[in-house]
Amino acid sequence: MSETIFSKIISGEIPSEFIYEDEYCVAIHDINPLAPVHVLVISRKPIVKLSDAGPEDAALLGHLMLAVGTVAKQLGVDEAFRLIVNNGEGAGMTIAHLHLHILAGRTFSEGRMATGLDA
Ligand code: 5GP
């Protein structure tokens, strides 16, 4: 896959503050936050999107979920956050490198889950 902003952030080519990192992923604050807390947990492995992951990525995908919990605890939002993974351009994905959005610090309603983040 071609290099993305996220692979450049991971390599350090684009300086960015990692609020969490481990061997599988890094976490950064989103540059354009859609909630008081908006963090991206980015896979170090440059998988384009979730549906491109295969059985060989099972440990990575599980690890990303655990990392989300760790980051949410670190930020004090583990009791209430929304986790979003955009899969493909049609779903709003703008950077073709697997990442998870943690959103918190505001109210999200179940009934409007599919209408976007302005609900
Ligand atoms: P996507 O729409 O692909 O699911 O999410 C990409 C996210 O990356 C967007 O929420 C966008 O604001 C964020 N983003 C884009 N470029 C940068 C950047 O250079 N630094 C940071 N921290 N976030 C970025």
Image (tube, rainbow, N blue to C red):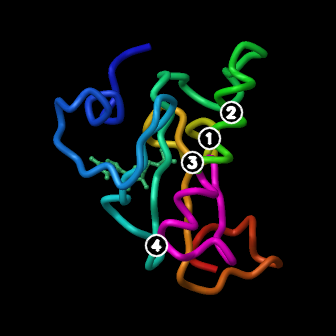
What's the CA distance linking mark 2 and mark 4? 22 Å
- Residue 70 as seen in the image, left or right of residue 41: right
Residue that mark 4 sits on: 37
Residue that mark 1 sits on: 64
Q: Give, as a three-letter code, the residue at label 2.
A: Leu
Of 116 and 11, nearer the camera is 11
> Residue lying farthest right?
111
Quarter residue 12 falls in = top left
Q: Which quarter of the image is occupied by the N terminus?
A: top left
The residue lying at 43 percent from left, 37 percent from top is: 95
Q: Position of residue 86 (x, y in %)?
A: 61, 46
Quarter residue 62 falls in = top right
Q: Local crowd at mark 2 within 10 Å, few (<14), some, or many (≥20)?
A: some
3 and 2 marks in contact (CB < 8 Å): no
Q: Secondary structure at mark 2?
A: helix
2 and 1 marks in contact (CB < 8 Å): yes
Q: Give, as a three-letter code, the residue at label 4.
A: Val
Q: Which residues are magenta?
A: 68-85
